[in-house]
Amino acid sequence: MKTGQTTGFLAASVSVFVLATLVGAPHRSVQNHSNAQSAKTASISVGSKLFTESVILAEIAAQTAEHNGYAVERKFELGGTRFVWSALLNGEIDIYADYSGTLQQEILGGLAEAAVPETLASIGVSMTRPLGFNNTYALGMTREHAASLSIRSISDLADHPDLRFGFSNEFMDRADGWRGLKASYNLPQSATGLDHNLAYRGIESGSIDVVDLYSTDPEIAYYDLLVLTDDRAYFPRYDAVYLYRSDLNRTAPDFTKAIEGIAGTIDESTMVALNAAVKLDGKSERVVAADFLDSEPPPTSERNALANRIWQRTWEHLQMVLISLAMAVIVAIPFGIAASRFRLLRRPILGLTAVLYTIPALALLVFMIPLLGIGTIPAIAALFLYSLLPIVRNTYEGLEGIPTALTETATSLGLTPRTRLLRIDLPMASRSILAGIKTAAVINIGTATLGALIGAGGYGQPILTGIRLDSVPLILEGAVPAAILALGAQSLLELIGSWLIPKGLRSETELSS
């Protein structure tokens, strides 16, 4: 291979893999009821938050739609309140379950209850009547520990400043969460943010003293926790409701009528039992929802077998990684060349890519939702931005590291800047450039697991579900293939390097391989 083809081949190699992925990738399955053959024109997209109760309520809505003859797309475990609410407003989903207190305090900024329906209607959103239970926030401790300190209410916590608080990350940042609670009760403690499901393991092990609870959590009884009295009535009511796009009243009127019919049918004890069936007994949300609806669960397709699930997640993950990496190679190498050749552009290019890299991945995904919605496209965009820095910097440093004597010789021979770049500079810098691409690929594979938070699928989906259900096998189902993929990407790029890097620039290890 001629050395002048280095840059083009680097980009083309990745692009070929992208094309193969897109052509061969199976479409994401849509789980339909057995009457899907006669599904109505409207397709209903059902979303949920990360926690189990939200997934169960979403599955109840999905099966209700299927029973009424509609095709359904399930976009479950999309992240926190802001993720799912944004998806509803943007039309990425049509319906999800939320809570009146969350709606008033977190979404609508403290709006009075009476003004909620009119405000929602003005933005094209409808709300059902309460489903029948109040899943309020609460604080809890092990009953034994609380008794030993004579703690019965939240106010009593102020007398014990050494207690360790561990709250869900969303509760830490909500308008109706920890900051307001701390001020209302004048609590002296600080709190640590962590996943809600992991907090129960922390309180069981004794590493946490106080956790936030949802009043319908089955773990309250399982771990024998005492729910502390909210003696200052800080928390509002959190009546469960369905929020759905108002245009469903026109496109799927029988579905919205059926959803409205669920209102008032799920009391607190029923919801606790549904949650316990999934989280403690290990039943699937599909089966639990079908039992509640007194119907047969939708048939499970062959894709639900372990090997087929991994295959599906692998294609989803590869699409995110390969497309974003190909885009980054095509953009970042010219940027690195420009930073090396033009002194005025050096700081802006290197500085901008460095700043993009410092933005937390989760925050970057949130920023993408208003622009690109949810799903694979915003995940690819975020991964593309993260990939720029290592490739730009390594291209720049590789070019800057070329010996001055060599460049002066090329100039004295009368080589044009373009010829020198293609035949001398890029081949000399190829090893550094490839190292940057390797780094970007490995970072992408790991960071792409967060794409599951916005419905992009990939290996992050079983990891999120495994954390939610405290299932190590599910976590490994995503983590192990991701690690294997990272090692495979590294090996593949090393093989490409053996073709691209001039023989005289390779290490002894590369020469022997």
Image (tube, grey):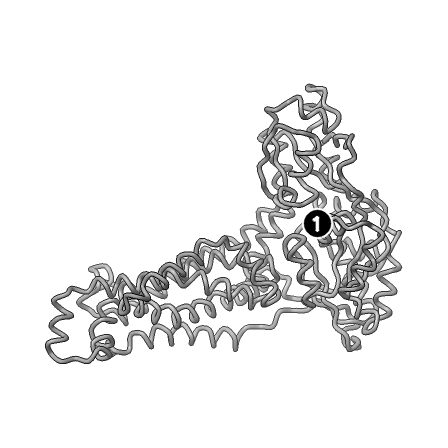
Task: Residue 482: give x, y in percent of width and height.
Answer: 48, 57
Q: Nearer the viewer, residue 98 or 219?
A: 98
Corner quadrant of residue 422: bottom left
Q: Is residue 242 left or right of residue 261?
A: left
Task: Residue 97: give x, y in percent of width and height.
Answer: 76, 55
Corner quadrant of residue 352: bottom left
Above-or-below relation of 80 to 457: above
The answer to whether residue 262 of the structure is visible from this angle is yes
- Count the marks: how many? 1
Q: Nearer the viewer, residue 147 or 303?
A: 147
**Quadrant including the C terminus:** bottom left
The answer to whether residue 491 of the structure is visible from this angle is no
Disc 1 is placed on an element classified as: helix
Q: Is residue 179 left or right of residue 36?
A: left
Tell me if mark 1 has few (under 14), some (14-19) or many (20+) residues whose alpha carbon lies within 10 angstroms of its own. some
Above-or-below relation of 389 to 253: above
Above-or-below relation of 53 to 252: above
**Quadrant including the N terminus:** bottom left
Corner quadrant of residue 373: bottom right
Q: Residue at x 75, y 46 (%)?
A: 275
Task: Residue 348: give x, y in percent of width and height.
Answer: 36, 62
Give the amino acid at mark 1.
Glu
Above-or-below relation of 99 to 10: above
Q: Nearer the viewer, residue 183 or 473?
A: 183
Q: Residue at x 42, y 76 (%)?
A: 16
Q: Is residue 11 left or right of residue 229?
A: left
Q: Is residue 506 left or right of residue 166?
A: left
Q: Which residue is mark 1?
A: 106
Task: Residue 359: give x, y in percent of width and height.
Answer: 48, 54
Q: Residue at x 89, y 59 (%)?
A: 261
